[in-house]
Amino acid sequence: MNQNISKRLGNLLSVKSLVTLTLTAVFAWMAMAGTISQDFMTVYAVVIAFYFGTQSQKVQDSLDGGENGNG
């Protein structure tokens, strides 16, 4: 169980995750202040799409690998 927690913490501290979390915090701050610019929205949307796209691809690759190993 501790190994699972360590692995998840390590994944959270990856550069990609840190950038995404930082941008999300800045987005929340700017939203509360009402100062979100179009340029920031574009960058934020691209980063979020990239982050979740790679996460989705990892899951899909894992599922495909499991099916190929059984067949």
Image: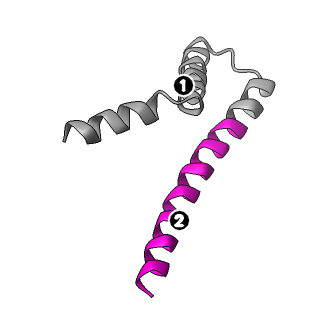
Q: CA distance from mark 2 to mark 1?
A: 23 Å
Front residue of this view, candidates 44 and 67: 67
* In the image, residue 17 lies in the stretch drawn in magenta: no
Relative to 45, 69 lies left or right: left
In the image, taking residue 37 as reference, residue 27 lies left or right, namely left
Residue labelled with disc 2: 60
User: Which residue ends up furthest to the right in the rendered image?
Assistant: 39
Q: Which residues make up the magenta segment?
A: 45-71
Classify 6 as above or below 31.
below
On the image, the x and y values in percent for residue 64 come to 51, 73
Label 1 Cα neighbours within 10 Å, binned few <14 / some 14-19 / many ≥20: few
- The image position of residue 51, as x and y in percent, is 60, 42
Magenta region, mostly helix, strand or loop? helix
Q: Amino acid at mark 2?
A: Gln
Q: Give the number of the disc on residue 31.
A: none
Q: What residue is drawn where x is 77% and y is 33%? A: 42
Question: The N terminus appears in which quarter of the rendering?
Answer: top left
